[in-house]
Amino acid sequence: MDVKKEIVAIQEEINTIKDPLFIKAIKNMLVYRKKMVQPEWWNTLTEEEKQKF
């Protein structure tokens, strides 16, 4: 599996999405992943910044 090709295909698919709820869900998944991979990033945010996510 070529990861770069997969990412490009996903990006092309995402570019066609217009549903704001689906876009928010994708953003939430990315934030969740970042919190799991880089917990120090999440811990450095203020409570107000965390609420934005």
Image (cartoon, rainbow, N blue to C red):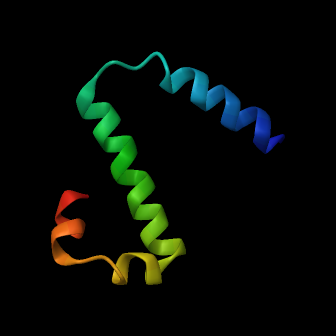
Residue at the spot x=32%, y=43% of the render? 25
Question: Which quadrant does the C terminus fall into?
Answer: bottom left
Residue at the image position 23 percent from the left and 77 percent from the top: 46
Residue lying at 28% horizontally and 22% vertically, measured from the top left:
19
Looking at the image, residue 26 lies above or below residue 36: above
Looking at the picture, how far across and down is residue 16, in whole percent? 46, 15
In the rendered structure, the answer to whether residue 19 lies left or right of residue 36 reads: left
Figure check: 26 above or below 43: above
Looking at the picture, does residue 30 appear above or below residue 46? above
In percent of width and height, residue 37 lies at 54, 73
Q: In front here: 36 or 44?
A: 44
Position in image of residue 52 (x %, y %): 20, 58
2 is higher (above) or lower (below) than 30: above
Q: Quadrant of the N terminus?
A: top right
Q: Quadrant of residue 22?
A: top left
Q: From the viewer's side, name the closer residue of 42 and 32.
A: 42
Give coordinates of residue 17: x percent, y percent.
40, 20
Number of numbered discs on residues: 0
View extreme (right): residue: 2
Q: Residue at x 33, y 18 (%)?
A: 18
Horizontal side, residue 7 vs residue 20: left or right:
right
Q: Nearer the viewer, residue 25 or 52?
A: 52
**Left or right of residue 13, residue 5 in this image:** right
